[in-house]
Amino acid sequence: MKEPLWARLEIPLNTSRENIWNALTLPELTQKYMYNCRLNCSWGLGSPANWEEVFKDGTSTTHVKGELIEYTPFERLRFKIFHSREILKNHVSELRFSLQHHEIGVLLVVEQGDFSSFPQAKEFYSECVQSWNYIQNDLKSTCLLTP
């Protein structure tokens, strides 16, 4: 059995659960940290969840396609992520956001995986870790915004 490979990021935030939830779910806020992509979702279980970038000329491209699998407001959000790279066709990861109690306010935990069954698993896992680390400061700043 292969060792599970989950990218994990923990961000303690001195803000409300509502501010964090808004940062995770409002398209105009996801765009601030998620590589200029707006999360479009109707928030019904099983509904599509797509991260779409809109360009200045009005055209757009969907960078990530997913499906909502858990929606517990102000606590938990989970998606299936369908990978589109040719090498990853038919591979799915899970993206999880959880809001937990923390001594300074709220701990935002981001997890994505399990990449252990993917081709070039360790490389893809490392790339995912780097991506989450890269956007960490923008995600934190967006969460700290006052609505």
Image: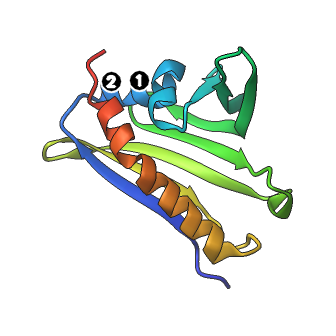
Res. 13 image quadrant: top left
Amino acid at pointer 2: Glu
Res. 46 image quadrant: top right
Q: Which mark is residue 10?
A: none
Task: Say which element carries label 1.
Answer: helix
Q: Is residue 112 visible?
A: yes
Q: Residue furthest front?
A: 57
Rendered-image quadrant of the N terminus: bottom right
In the image, residue 106 sits, relative to residue 48, either above or below, namely below
Which residue is at a point 31% across and 15% down the rendered structure image?
A: 147
Q: Which residue is mark 2?
A: 18
Task: Say which element carries label 2.
Answer: helix
Crowdedness near tag 1: few (<14), some (14–19) or many (≥20) residues, C-alpha within 10 Å: many
Q: Residue furthest left?
A: 103
Amino acid at pointer 1: Asn
- Could you tell me residue 104's position as x and y percent? 13, 43
Q: Nearer the viewer, residue 100 or 40?
A: 40
Which residue is at a point 46% across and 31% down the rendered structure image?
A: 24
In the image, residue 135 sits, relative to residue 14, either above or below, namely below
Q: Which residue is mark 1?
A: 22
Q: Is residue 116 visible?
A: no
Contact between marks 2 and 1 (CB within 8 A): the answer is yes
Please give left or right for residue 106 compared with residue 71 in the image: left
